[in-house]
Amino acid sequence: MDVVPTAAREHERPVTEQPPRGRSGLLLARHGQTDDNLEPIRAQGFSDTPLNATGLEQAHALAERVATEFEVRALWSSDLARARVTAEIVGRRIGLEPRLDPRLREGDRGDWEGRRFIDIAREEPDAYAAWRRGGAGFRFPGGESLQEHSDRVWQALEEIRERGPLPALIVCHRGSIRAVLCRFDPRGLDAFHTYEVPNTGVVEL
C-alpha cells in the first residue's frame, strides 16, 4: 500500500496512520505527475492538466508494476486527462481499455482552481485554515464539499465492484483516494489530510 509519510510543508501534514489492507477487489492508483503537483503546488480539481515528462515516465513504471504485481481484470479511470492518460498507458501494457467515470474526478476546487496554495493561505487565511482542518462540512468556495466528493467517488466504486469483473484498477486522484480512505477511518473526513498518496501510488482496498 503506497500511503506514505511526507515531509512537513505548509500545505501538507505527515501521515500518522495507515488503514488495514482489505480484500474488496479494488485497487486505487493516483495519476502521474503534472506541473501543478510541483512546488508551489496549485489546486487542480476539475482542471484538465496534462502529465508532464516525469508523469509519463511514472505512468509507464506503474504499467510495469501492475503487469507484474497485480492480477487486474478491469480498468477504470477518471475522465480528466492526467488520470485518463495514466490509465491508457497501463491499459496498453496489460491489454485492457480503460472505462471512464467522471465521478472519480478530483474534488471540485471551485474558485481555488489553478491557484497556488501558498497564495490562498496568504489571501484567504480563514478559508485556508478550514481546508487544512478538513472535515465533512468543508466546502471549497464555489466548489463542492469534501462530503459530496466522498459520496460521489464511493458511489462509483460500489457500482464498479457490483458490475465487475474484479480485481479492478481505478486510476484517479489524491483527493479521491483520501476521501475513500477516510470512510475506513473512525475520524472520518477529519482525517483527510493525514493520508498522502504519491503520484502513481497504489492502494489496495
Image (spheres, rainbow, N blue to C red):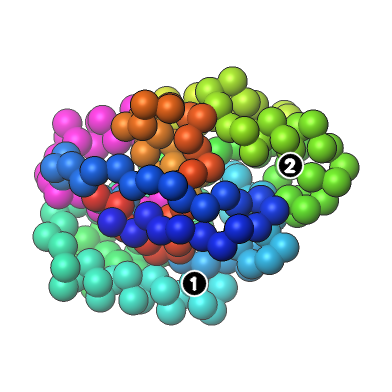
Amino acid type at circle 2 is: Trp
Mark number for residue 55? 1
Point 29% across, 35% down: residue: 157
Residue placed most toward the observer, 116 or 196:
196
Number of marks in the rendered image: 2
Percent position (x, y) of residue 176? 45, 42
Q: Give, as a single range, the part of the protein colored magenta.
A: 153-172
Residue placed most toward the observer, 118 or 16:
16
Amino acid type at circle 1 is: Gly
Of the numbered discs 1 and 2, the one sitting upstream in the chain is 1
Residue placed most toward the observer, 188 or 97:
188
Residue 125: quadrant of the picture: top right
Q: Is residue 98 above or below residue 54?
A: above
Residue 98 in view in this figure: no
Percent position (x, y) of residue 44? 63, 51
Percent position (x, y) of residue 32? 46, 66
Residue, disc 2 = 112
Numbered disc 2: secondary structure: helix
Numbered disc 1: secondary structure: helix
Asked whether residue 189 is drawn in magenta, I would say no
